Amino acid sequence: MALTDATHDAQDFVPAAEVEEVELYHPKTWLGKYVFSQDAKIIALQYSITAMAVGLLALVLSVLMRIQLAWPGAVSFITPDAYLQFVTMHGMIMVIYLLTALFLGGFGNYLIPLMLGARDMVFPYVNMISYWIYLFAVLLLLASFFTPGGPTGSGWTLYPPQAILPGTPGASWGITLMVISLAFFVIGFTMGGLNYVVTVLQARTRGMTLMRMPLTIWAIFTATILALLAFPALLVSAIMMSLDNLLGTSYFMPAIVSLGQQLDHSGGSPVLFQHLFWFFGHPEVYIVALPAFGIVSDLLSVHARKNIFGYRLMVWAIVVIGGLSFIVWAHHMYVSGMNPYFGFFFATTTLIIAVPTAIKVYNWVLTLWRGNIRLTVPMLFAIGFVFTFINGGLTGIFLGNVIVDVPLSDTYFVVAHFHMVMAVSPILAVFGAVYHWYPKITGRMLNEGLGKFHFWVTFVGLYCLYYPMHYLGILGVPRRYFSNVGANGLPDWIPESAQFVNIWISIAAITVASVQLLFLYNLYRSATHGKPAGGNPWGATTLEWQTSDTPPTHGNFGKELPSVYRWAYDFSVPGAEEDFIPQNVPASKNTGQAS
Amino acid sequence: MSIFRTLSTKPWVAERGYVSDSHGFRLPTAKVFLSVFLGVVTAVFGLLTAAYFIRMAYADWQALPVPALLWLNTAILILSSIALQWARVAAGREHADGVRRGLLAGGALAFAFLVGQFLVWRQLGSLGYFVDSNPSNSFFYLITGLHGVHLLGGLVAWFRASIRLWRGAEVAKIHMSVELCAMYWHFLLVVWLVMFGLLLVT
């Protein structure tokens, strides 16, 4: 690639965007404009709304589980089977159909073209199909609630043999629909994911070098590559599981006697499934964590009016974490009876991830150091993310060690750990991102008072919820159990104090869940009644805030695409007129010294 | 290596912030798109191969006899790839007749390959090697099936390019489509050779 030193001196003229103009598809009907739209911004909203709707269902399921755990038998329709089905659907929906779809399909679609100065994704039609396949996958998943036997209750990991044996809830229709839905999700995601990657590689505007990209884009780009390489493992295992289930093959199914009957399967390897599943499953953690890292980096920088500390190291850390995430999968399988040397290898690689991750945490903290911190709602959520991620990361160091993991495996300690690190942290980043970019999407600000209330109740509530769970886990309370109480309604094999903690956790969970309704109300109400935001309410430097229209129209920018002259973090440049210099301001106009 | 050079630029120093005078890669976008997709497909077949080896180590594995027809099918797929390569070269020279012949031969041979694979399935079935008889059979049906589905997808792209050509589109306009088809065909040929080799040596 030929590189020219374009901004060698301040007077150098960088010609306007020489990017080939793409021919945009201009729909004539309302349906083509808002429903079957090929505009990445509309697709992003479709992805986000679908993901949030199905996520709301998963939230309700978790509340039902908490009601059962605190007040066993209080709700009659929560049977042991239903409880397991709720556990499974809650996990699967939250991880895949909410977080993956929201971060990559939602934020990816909205931010990649805008932040890179592109008109749209490189293949808008494929991008549109991606959403409709995703929606189809969601509908298939929801359909399993209405089949005989209901959805699968095998846990979100779908481990065979129990996932397809008659004793498990949803063993016939539920699991079949689940794996088919997952297969469609993977196909749909691949169509979108190819677009995100190729758009980053090919459609950046003039001057937007890779190392000038905002960290949000670096993170979404890397996460998409992880997803493209990891989801095939899910696809392959889903297909093989279906064949075991429907055609009687024995990829995963060992010889087994079920309900007194010798089944036709023989010789299969359940551990093979675990390897395939976690080869997808661990990168999946980073598929939802990396975008959160990127978004939080940008939020901290904008709202602290300070450049991100160690930009290059942040990029390298993202790439290194992405690479490492493919060689740690078996730390989910310490109790599967694998070779101890394997355990040693995977414990080592797992703990090595702490290095790039710690670099990121230090850089976030050092970005805040002596910054001009504005405690806006997005900033609160971003700081909340850093706190929570450190907490979840520290328990990860516990669980990464084989000898600590074995006794804690399958207890509430694990539940607390992974919720802190890959449920609460990413969702805090999502909230921060929504409060941050909502003004660009709708042209209006979200209500700040409601936002702060939402933040504090959520943040404090989540700690009330998950901190005690660590204690329950160390006490040995197992996860996925329907009930810990005997027939007399008193805890029969966990201490009474543990049951009290369960009640406390449930109250916290219900409080946190209900305050999310306030957030949804804020989203709905502010769209029409919010304070008008203007083009750049936060004083941010990245290109999406420099569009001629807010909300941006189809094609994103006006007649000419912007040219980029600087990185995304020129905040508080000494001598500059304002405390931020947008990326498309030429060097010649700059009065500061740093550029 | 330019990737390391890129990753070590200091974007905060404007003087060092290089601006590429071509933007992004020089490769056509569609080609990059296909290449990334081929990476994903490689992951699918790579993982299947890994699963194949792991499952093979178990006691109940019995190798599948290799039907002679598979050799013929392999030859047909190689010819199909050659024909599309021919079309690709002809398209580069704007030689419309050559493109037509190459496309037609390539598509017909690919179709013949799929029919051949189906006949192999029928043959194995009539000999009692069903998909659930033994894990080696299960893997054979799965791998050939997935490979066939990918080739079918390629035939859809091939069909669209051919239709455009026969309706009188200029060769220059479908040059990229022909080139992508050829690239995809070669890739699927390599995948097939690796998978066939896997079957032969185990």
Image: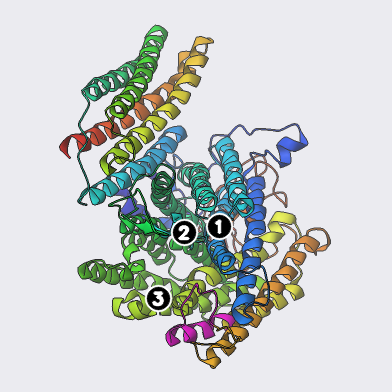
Eyeballing the image, is A225 above or below A485?
above
Q: Which circle's residue, 2 or 3, is located before the other in the chain?
A: 2
Three-letter code, disc 2: Ile
Q: Nearer the viewer, residue B197 or A561?
A: B197
Q: Which residue is outermost to the front?
A: A260
Looking at the rendered structure, which numbered label has been put on residue A287? 2
The residue indicated by pointer 3 is A396
Three-letter code, disc 1: Phe
Q: Nearer the viewer, residue A246 or A141?
A: A246
Q: Which residue is outermost to the top?
A: B97
Image position, residue B152 (x, y; %): 43, 27
Q: Is residue A101 magenta?
A: no
Task: Give me the chain letter of mark 2.
Answer: A
Q: Which circle's residue, 3 or 1, is located before the other in the chain?
A: 1
Are the residues tagged 1 and 2 within 8 Å (C-beta)?
yes
Q: Which circle's residue, 1 or 2, is located before the other in the chain?
A: 1
Q: Nearer the viewer, residue B96 or A149?
A: A149
Q: Is residue A469 magenta?
A: yes
Q: Is residue A204 visible?
A: no
Q: Secondary structure at mark 2?
A: helix
Q: Nearer the viewer, residue B73 or A550?
A: B73
Which of the 4 image quarters holds residue A447?
Answer: bottom right
Q: Is residue B192 visible?
A: yes
Image position, residue A223 (x, y; %): 45, 56
**Distance in Å between CA atoms under marks 1 and 2:** 9 Å
The residue indicated by pointer 1 is A103
* Magenta residues, start to end: A464-484
